[in-house]
Amino acid sequence: MSWVDINTANGAVWNPINDAGGGVWTDINTTSGQVWAPVNDVGGGAWANVSTATIDVIAVANAMTRVAVGLEPETSRFNVEVNGRKLADIRQDGVVNILDVQAYFDYIYDELEDQDEVDYINNVMFPYMLANPATYQDYYAGGTVWTDITT
């Protein structure tokens, strides 16, 4: 059995690499349980991070509605600051409220007219959620989340 050092937000974790058939897999332990992540060798001692996971836009809409009325765990998850802005603060007014929920519904139905808000959802909010599966995997529509491993 081989071992790799996987750097996580909580520090280094040593995990076994197991052959799960059709490729090499690594056992990654997260706070929400065990996640199996495929590992690809791209040469030069580096391992690739390729994600096919997508955001479940309806699950996020439900979560944002819960944030607007202060319910957990969504309030903690979506009020986290990313580059000085709360994750679900689509309208960038410093709070996550029903106006952000409305903007998000407009986004879902392709009616959000403010391009800065559309860009924020596409280029900041969703990528941040996909990069942090331990916190946001409840809002994934499916797919594979791969983990960066540097040897």
Image (cartoon, helix red, strand yellow):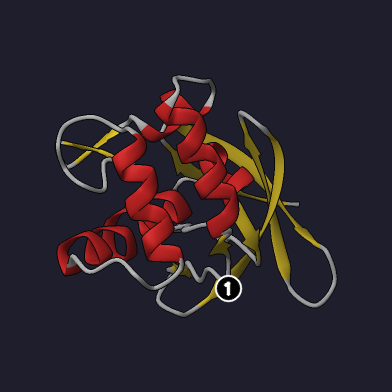
Residue 88 % position (x, y): 33, 41
- Disc 1: CA contacts within 10 A as few (<14), some (14-19) or many (>=20): some
Q: Is residue 46 above or below residue 147?
A: below
Task: Decide if residue 77 is in sight here.
Answer: yes
Q: Which structural element holds mark 1?
A: strand
**Which residue does the numbered mark 1 point to in the structure image?**
40
Q: Amino acid at mark 1?
A: Asn
Compared with 52, 13 (above or below) is: above
- Where residue 138 sits: x, y (%)? 63, 44
Q: Residue at x 48, y 79 (%)?
A: 42
Query: Could you tell me which quadrant the C terminus lies in?
Result: bottom left
Rendered image quadrant of residue 79: top left
Residue 74 left/right relative to 115: right
Q: Is residue 95 left or right of residue 72?
A: left
* Of residues 142 and 91, the one drawn nearer to the viewer in this rendering: 91
Instruction: Judge whether 137 appears above or below 113 on screen.
Output: above
Q: Based on the displayed image, in which of its 4 quarters is residue 144 positioned?
A: bottom right
Where residue 23 sits in the image (x, y, percent)?
A: 74, 74
Q: Which of 137/147 is in front?
A: 137
Task: Give the x, y percent position of residue 147.
Answer: 53, 57
| Point 64% across, 61% down: residue | 141
| Residue nearer the viewer, 129 or 6 | 129
Residue drawn 54% across and 35% down?
A: 13
| Residue 3 appears left or right of 47 | right
Query: Eyeballing the image, is 3 above or below 40?
Result: above
